[in-house]
Image: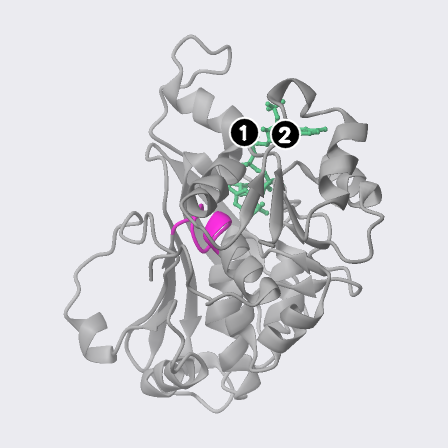
Amino acid sequence: MLPKVFIDGEAGTTGLQIAERLRARNDLELISIDPAKRKDNDERARLMNMSDAVILCLPDEAARLGVSLVTSPNTVIIDASTAHRVNNSWTYGFPEMDKNQRAAIRASRRISNPGCYPTGVIALLRPLISKWLLPTSWPIVVSAVSGYSGGGKAMIAEFEDTESETSTDENFRIYGLTQKHKHPPEMRKYSRLEHLPVFMPSVGRFAQGMIIEIGLPLWAIPGKPKRAQLQAALAAAYEGERFVKVATLAECDAMTGLEPEACNGTNRLELFVFGSDEEVRLVARLDNLGKGASGAAVQNLNISLGFDEDAGLIA
Ligand SMILES: NC(=O)C1=CN([C@@H]2O[C@H](COP(=O)(O)OP(=O)(O)OC[C@H]3O[C@@H](n4cnc5c(N)ncnc54)[C@H](OP(=O)(O)O)[C@@H]3O)[C@@H](O)[C@H]2O)C=CC1
Ligand SMILES: CC(=O)N[C@@H](CCC(=O)OP(=O)(O)O)C(=O)O
């Protein structure tokens, strides 16, 4: 019998893209809820408990409630929301983060999908901190820009639907001005930082794709690490990984700019170390709906259910 997979929130931005990646597959059965019953808890519970895996693509509160509906001990939950990302009872669904992480994901029934921005931050910082090239106490400032699909259906309507009450004609804006964004605790925990990073997100008039940047004044860091050491640490950490690509220094030096949409439609995460031995710009690029959400959820599902890790995904 094929494993059954239920996406709760299938009609949302993340859910739709997961369904798109799974619908074409013949190695699993996708269970869909009658749209009229999508907020009926009895029906949700029935479908969840008959499934081998449930992917929650819901706002945080609805995701917490969704988890409480799962009583079957065999059902794996992959939660795309922020609700359980720093909860020690859950496994963080970032397989490339650590050599043991895949095995942890495979053994777990509660997997929390990483946030889109934290995916870039953790991918850049964790190897540098692990190799002692950056002290855990270093003050980190993260600047980032996302496409507007990052804000889900509501933000898509803001940018695309001129009839919407919240319709905007802005092309770009910074946000998260109070430093209360939901992502810094996750960035701190899995990068192994002592302090919360300062987080400076922004959104632009393009649907999908994102860039995350961290500037490091190497001259000020104890031990004065060289740019090549940083690049080598990243390249070593992700050697052999099909979805994480670390640019060589020559590739970085040949570039004069970087746009955020190049990974769209893929599950790729690209990492760059620009600059000199004095100052570097660490950069991550990904599709917020690819490795930042839906692609990552499918990758975790594949690991959890024992499929090829890249089934349904584009590297
Ligand atoms: N968009 C992105 O780039 C990313 C999103 N995520 C996370 O994924 C989750 C979903 O986000 P996204 O897809 O963007 O959001 P959307 O707003 O696009 O979709 C959310 C879906 O959840 C449904 N929903 C809301 N409340 C309930 C409820 N109580 N019971 C059942 N269904 C409900 C909505 O139904 P309806 O609107 O029809 O009522 C909608 O279909 C969020 O936690 C988000 O943080 C994670 C990484 C990136
Ligand atoms: C442009 C925009 O608004 N982006 C969202 C991030 C996407 C998201 O929903 O966050 P998760 O990755 O944690 O689920 C935000 O900043 O809240």
Q: What element carries label 2?
A: loop
The x, y position of residue 92, in whole percent, is 65, 64
Q: Can residue 148 be seen in this view?
A: yes
Q: Is mark 1 on a helix, strand or loop?
A: loop
The x, y position of residue 205, in whole percent, is 34, 32
- Name the chief secondary structure element in magenta: loop
Q: Can residue 141 be seen in this view?
A: no
Kindly identify which residue carries mark 1: 11
User: What segment carries the magenta color?
Assistant: 287-295
Picture disc at residue 33: 2
Q: Distance between the residues labelled 2 and 1?
A: 10 Å
The residue under label 2 is which amino acid type?
A: Ile
The magenta stretch spans residue 289: yes
The residue positioned 74% from the left and 33% from the top of the image is: 44
Q: In the image, 282: left or right of 121? A: left
Say whether mark 1 is within 8 Å of ligand 1. yes
All told, the count of numbered labels is: 2
Residue at the limit of the structure toward the bottom, as seen here: 223
In which of the image's four quarters is ligand 2 placed?
top right
- 140 vs 260, nearest the viewer: 260
Q: In which quarter of the image is residue 277?
A: bottom left
The magenta stretch spans residue 112: no
Q: In this view, does 217 lie above or below 256?
A: below
